[in-house]
């Protein structure tokens, strides 16, 4: 299938379940925000939004190990080495459990300082800690669901990966309603709903191991340090993507709190919840590309691989245009979703949506570049793209803009950082500072043809 199906058709086969699945992961967080906003109030919404970066931290670890391991797994399948593929999967699961356990254990010891570090103040600290504690306590559940979903998609079953996430989202919605509006558990109810929904999603994903076509499985193996090193190395860009997202959330919360106050924090909470959904969609395009390009890289089908990159790039830009237009047209609807009724917050949020959503015109292109270079083990370029759009450009701009142009310009930091990163990548490719496909492509593609 990988080598014979037409590129547009094969890409769609992976894209639709990937987009849908990633969107449902984001909806789990969005649902928490919506129910908390209506059932607890603006302070509850701000509190959960400040705690959400811990979810990104946990997710970043699962993407680090999951994408690193899955890339190696698909390359091994492309090389027809099934035993090595299973060995990689075994190492990935063990590594995920140990790594996540250590991080969560450390964070549980310093919950309250962590909450203040994320931008909490005395008015909302109780909401932050209530949500933070439960997400940390059951953090391993989120990691296992994400890693299983990634590997199952790479094992040729993107539909089941999507189904697991559908079940997670549906259960989360039902339990959020029960726990918040019926049992009145507040933000704790939102956190418990997310945990239980995720656990049931894992049970759905485990049915993959009962199917006849599956190649995924565990093998008895000794610890292979070279595999662990490669998993960490290849997956590092995915870790930075999610890790930098957490840093950017915290930095935004602190900046809005400093320059605008509670109005800015609540307005950003609304925009950030929507951003969580859209960011997952763009990551989903790259996640659909990853198993395809990793397999083709392993099989040395470089010319065919180039076609998939072009298709993914067009898809990413097209989605960006659609999301930007949706923000312009539907900004009032988005604010109404969260039940915000304070005029000052409504006005500032409308400005934020228009300015912030311009960044989606560039985000899709950057995410495709990151996932593609990571999928072919070119970690240096993938890491540079992420650092450019986050720490190298974002952090300085977040300090410069409000000081020079006022508080409204805080919203422009995201689109400017993304746009400059796209410009740098365009110049690098045009001037041959970097290559889109391996430089030996012409010779190898002739041999493989």
Image: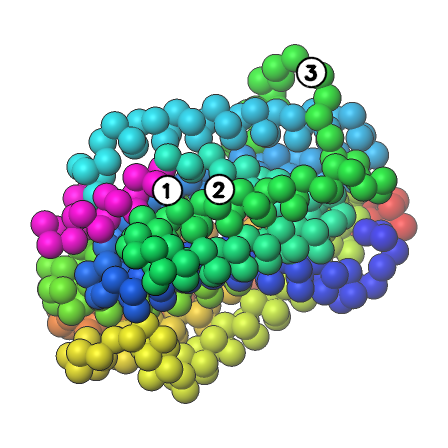
Q: Is residue 439 above or below residue 279?
A: above
| CB under 8 Å between discs 1 and 2 | yes
The span from disc 2 to disc 3 (Cα, nearest Å) is 26 Å
Relative depth, front residue between 272 and 338: 338
Q: Residue at x 78, y 25 (%)?
A: 83
Q: Is residue 409 left or right of residue 280?
A: left
Disc number for residue 221:
3
Q: Residue 34 magenta-drawn?
A: no
Q: Is label 1 in a helix, a strand or a loop?
A: helix
Q: Is label 2 in a helix, a strand or a loop?
A: helix
Judging from the image, the colouring scheme is rainbow
Q: Is residue 151 left or right of residue 122?
A: right
10 Å crowding of disc 1: few (<14), some (14-19), many (20+): many
Disc number for residue 93:
none
| CB under 8 Å between discs 2 and 3 | no
Where does the magenta region start and end?
116-136
Relative depth, front residue between 233 and 36: 36
Disc number for residue 142:
2
What secondary structure characterizes most of the magenta part?
A: helix
Relative depth, front residue between 405 and 235: 235
Relative depth, front residue between 64 and 103: 103
Q: Residue at x 50, y 27 (%)?
A: 97
* Residue 255, position as x, y percentages in the image: 17, 58
**Mark toward the start of the polypeptide (1 vs 2):** 1
10 Å crowding of disc 3: few (<14), some (14-19), many (20+): few
- State whether residue 62 appears in this view: no
């Amino acid at each position: 299938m990988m080598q014979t199906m037409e590129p547009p058709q094969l890409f769609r086969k992976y894209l639709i379940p990937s987009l849908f699945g990633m969107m449902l992961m984001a909806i789990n967080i969005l649902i928490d925000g919506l129910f908390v906003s209506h059932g607890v109030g603006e302070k509850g919404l701000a509190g959960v939004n400040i705690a959400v970066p811990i979810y990104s931290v946990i997710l970043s670890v699962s993407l680090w190990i999951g994408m690193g391991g899955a890339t190696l797994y698909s390359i091994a399948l492309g090389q027809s080495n099934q035993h090595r593929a299973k060995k990689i999967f075994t190492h990935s699961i063990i590594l995920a459990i140990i790594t996540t356990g250590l991080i969560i254990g450390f964070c549980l010891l310093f919950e309250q300082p962590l909450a203040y570090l994320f931008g909490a103040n005395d008015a909302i600290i109780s909401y932050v800690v209530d949500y933070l504690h439960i997400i940390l306590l059951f953090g391993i559940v989120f990691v296992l669901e994400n890693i299983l979903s990634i590997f199952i998609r790479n094992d040729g079953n993107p539909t089941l990966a999507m189904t697991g996430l559908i079940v997670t989202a549906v259960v989360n919605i039902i339990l959020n309603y029960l726990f918040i509006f019926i049992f009145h558990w507040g933000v704790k109810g939102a956190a418990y709903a997310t945990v239980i929904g995720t656990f049931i999603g894992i049970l759905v994903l485990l049915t993959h191991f009962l199917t006849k076509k599956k190649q995924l499985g565990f093998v008895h193996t000794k610890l292979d340090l070279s595999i662990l090193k490669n998993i960490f190395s290849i997956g590092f860009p995915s870790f930075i993507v999610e890790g930098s997202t957490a840093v950017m959330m915290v930095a935004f919360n602190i900046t809005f709190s400093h320059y605008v106050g509670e109005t800015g924090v609540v307005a950003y909470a609304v925009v950030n919840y929507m951003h969580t959904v859209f960011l997952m969609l763009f990551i989903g395009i790259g996640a659909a590309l990853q198993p395809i390009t990793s397999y083709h890289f392993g099989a040395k089908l470089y010319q065919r691989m180039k076609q998939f990159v072009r298709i993914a790039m067009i898809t990413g830009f097209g989605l960006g245009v659609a999301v930007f237009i949706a923000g312009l047209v539907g900004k009032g609807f988005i604010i109404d979703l969260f039940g915000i009724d304070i005029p000052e917050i409504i006005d500032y949020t409308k400005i934020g949506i228009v300015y912030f959503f311009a960044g989606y015109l560039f985000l899709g292109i950057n995410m495709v570049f990151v996932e593609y270079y990571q999928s072919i083990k070119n970690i240096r370029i993938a890491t540079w793209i992420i650092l450019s759009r986050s720490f190298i450009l974002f952090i300085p701009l977040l300090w410069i803009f409000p000081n020079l142009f006022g508080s409204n310009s805080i919203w422009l930091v995201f689109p400017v950082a993304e746009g400059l990163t796209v410009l740098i990548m365009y110049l690098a490719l045009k001037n041959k500072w970097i290559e889109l496909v391996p430089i030996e492509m012409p010779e190898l593609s002739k041999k493989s043809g």
